Amino acid sequence: MEKVKNYIVVSIFSLIVLGFGIFFWLIPDNELSESERRALEQAPALNFDTFFSGEFSDSLENYLLDQFPLREGFRMLNSAMRLYLMRQQDVDGLWVDGNSIYKIEYPLDQQQIEYGADIINSVYETYLSDMDVYYSIIPDKNYFAPEGHLSLDYGMLLEIMEENITGPEYIDIFGELSLEDYYRTDTHWRQDSLFGVVSTIGQAMGISEYLTSEEEYTAHQLYPFNGVYLGQTALPIEPDTITYLTSEFTENTIVTGIELDGQEPVYMLDRFDGLDGYDVFLGGAQALLTIECPNAKTDRELIIFRDSFGSSIAPLFTGAYSKITIVDLRYIPTALLGDYIEFAGQDVLFLYSTLLLNSSMLMR
């Protein structure tokens, strides 16, 4: 009887292995994982050099892991078991509270923060010393998250920035934000929740009377928005909805950039179905963009040095500025700015999230 039982177990196991093997070779390889927003490993080339160097075996292992049958289902099962069965606090640095997902950002890296301050000082001293310059810091949503997980020392971060930045005036927007102002499944803030932030910045920069009021905007929704954290956990959590706001000013803008092919609107709706739906705002990561608003209430100009958070707030300034230049120092070196921008009396805003400041060596 024991032999029969063992035979049945071995037979079932062999059939499962054989079935997965046949399934693996029959189904075509996937090139991209949309949920993880990355390219998947493809079948490695086998030759004398790759075999004896060990490169082939390493690539083969990654290929088999990336192309494993029913991979997304197993990823979801793995996350669910680790979080809910094994009661781990997080899965690869991501933790879940209800339908909201957070990424642990810890610890505070003082060297990175100081480097970020130095970058701002360098740009200010090189190009902006005779202009009206401001800086503001965007708290990541962990600042508002339930307690019980590791998070940055935000007080120390602000203190380091204040002690090291010379020249630009600080605009505090922490009090204008709450947890509800961020996407549940993503790192970014919601454009339709930024009127308090825009008002605070506008008051500090002297443009309040030219800002478009909340009542003048029309809200449009895009669903489903699978935020970056949702794809990384692979859990069956309800996606977010992106709400973008249009006005007579956003509708009449012209966006150009060194990485764009011709003119674009501020909301590039064709990007919503790409790897990152948040790219509807100004097309996502771009080194340098120019937003021109011919019917703006003033002829003033603005330069925003930003990370990805700036993509969704910049359109809300179109009524107050006839031209807005958007700069991402992760993709264009400080030394080259003078080749692309004529600095001549514009208002200037450095707008960076705590996430980038804690990894500011990405800036150049």
Image: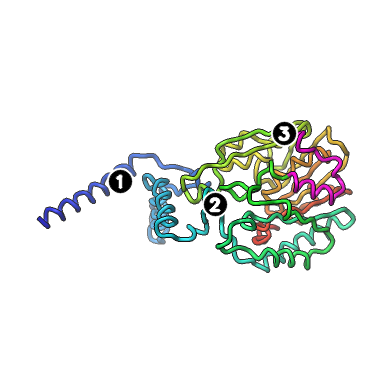
Residue 129 lies in quadrant: bottom right
Q: Position of residue 77 (x, y in %)?
A: 40, 50
Q: Residues within 10 Å of mark 3 (few under 14, many from 20)?
A: some
**Cα distance between the residues tagged 2 and 3:** 28 Å
Q: Position of residue 92 (x, y in %)?
A: 49, 58
Q: Amino acid at mark 2?
A: Ile
Question: Is residue 245 placed above or below 346 in the rendered structure?
Answer: above
Q: Which mark is residue 20?
A: 1
Q: Amino acid at mark 3?
A: Thr
Q: Which mark is residue 101?
A: 2
Q: Position of residue 188 (x, y in %)?
A: 63, 48
Q: Is residue 49 visible?
A: no
74 with respect to 142 (left or right): left
Q: Secondary structure at mark 1?
A: helix
Look at the image and tell me in which quarter the N terminus lies: bottom left
**Cα distance between the residues tagged 3 and 1:** 50 Å
**Cα distance between the residues tagged 1 and 2:** 32 Å
4 with respect to 329 (left or right): left
Queried whether the magenta region covers residue 205, the answer comes back as: yes
Q: Secondary structure at mark 3?
A: strand
Q: Secondary structure at mark 2?
A: strand
- Lower sequence index among marks 1 and 2: 1
- Lower sequence index among marks 3 and 1: 1
Magenta stretch, main secondary structure, is helix
Queried whether the magenta region covers residue 80, the answer comes back as: no
Question: Is residue 251 placed above or below 239 in the rendered structure?
Answer: above
Q: Amino acid at mark 1?
A: Phe
Magenta-tinted stretch: 195-218
Q: Which mark is residue 246?
A: 3
Q: Is residue 237 visible?
A: yes
Q: Residue at x 80, y 49 (%)?
A: 201
